[in-house]
Amino acid sequence: MLDKNAKIFVAGHRGLVGSAIWKNLQDKGYTHLIGRTHQELDLLDAVAVHRFFDEEQPEYVFLAAAFVGGIMANSIYRADFIYKNLQIQQNVIGESFRHQVKKLLFLGSTCIYPRDAEQPMKEDVLLTSPLEYTNEPYAIAKIAGLKMCESFNLQYGTNYIAVMPTNLYGPNDNFDLERSHVLPAMIRKIHLAHCLQQGDWSAVATDLNRRPVEGVDGNSTREEILDVLGKYGIGTDEVRLWGTGTPLREFLWSEEMADACVFVMEHVDFKDTFKPGDKEIRNCHINIGTGKEISIRQLAELIVDTVGYRGRLAFDSSKPDGTMRKLTDPSKLHALGWHHKIEIEEGVQRMYQWYLS
């Protein structure tokens, strides 16, 4: 177990993942948490990271900081995705080693797995065939990070663990219609379509004032509002979503992912992540997921029910579907003693309540 007064650095403590880990640690009574905003500490700056470790001397590190984005961003900013993520990992893991950090948890993503990996994906399908082209630079950076942890452990006896969470959703998620992930985007679209159908313009204005779309906010004319929402498939009597609705996705509530991360930090050591007697020690990372999936169409229908929307739900099959299946096998994590509790029905309910408040 960790000492409740131990100095714990959460890198990326403002993001979806990092903020959930920070809150979980606080709730469990950890008193000495260290966080820095991007303005206070640029993790791309090796000199600044070195100075930070010299001054703070953290004993434990959660590396939840990363340069992330959806399918569009991954296609456009390929150099940024590989360069920035490698640099962040290099600096934080390197300084953790130099300052003899007792334990480090590195957060990756399930996009490290091959595009055509056998489903559900076990840890050992890593590097068995080609990656999905769109997010290859990001995936390669994350693979380098987990291999760095593994290699330091094997050469120097350090205790660095890498975890690979599935698709996350939860409080502090991004609801930007251009850049958000599928679940928050659908919640917002269906909520707005519901408001339009009810003729509840004050609710529409409130929503757009909080999160303007392409410069259009609650003070814009109704014509301008209908125009910009129409671009995203949101109308007065129907909502149109991308793709066919057939792809299957796995979703994990972000606070549960944080709980799994803290559990791993408290109870799992590097030696627990592979079989004793293995000639080649590899694939020591741990999947964090539910092992359950839902189709995009079923998810949309669940959100429609939760919101109480009465209009039409349509799918635009001229738009891409992305990968058809991406399911993790979390049996390694189960064997180590952690299981998820929040199913998607309850999660969507909580997410919508959070969004409304």
Image (tube, helix red, strand yellow):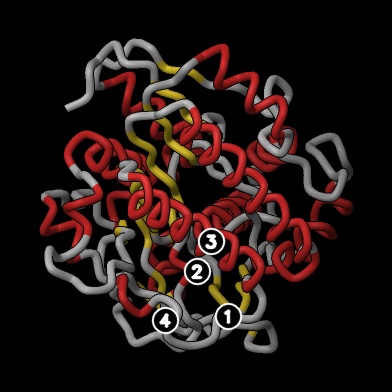
**Disc 2: CA contacts within 10 A as few (<14), some (14-19) or many (>=20):** many
Q: Mark 1 points at which residue?
A: 132
Q: Residue 144 — which label?
A: 3
**Residue appearing at x 84%, y 60% in the figure:** 227
Disc on the earlier residue, 2 or 3? 2
Is 340 above or below relative to 73? above
Q: Which amino acid does label 4 sit on?
A: Arg
Q: Are marks 1 and 2 in contact (CB under 8 Å)?
A: yes
- Residue 308's place in the image compared with 41, above or below, is below
Q: Please state if 321 lies on the left or on the right of 306 as rendered.
A: right
Q: In this figure, which residue is indicated by the disc labeled 4? A: 325
Q: Which amino acid does label 1 sit on?
A: Glu
Q: Can residue 70 be seen in this view?
A: yes
Q: Can residue 305 be seen in this view?
A: no
Callout 2 amino acid: Cys
Task: Provide the residue designation for mark 2.
Answer: 111
Tag 3 secondary structure: helix
Q: Distance between the residues labelled 3 and 4?
A: 24 Å
Kind of residue sitting beneath label 3: Ala
Q: Mark 1 against mark 4, which lies toward the viewer?
A: 1
- Corner quadrant of residue 204: top right
- The earlier-in-sequence mark between 1 and 2 is 2
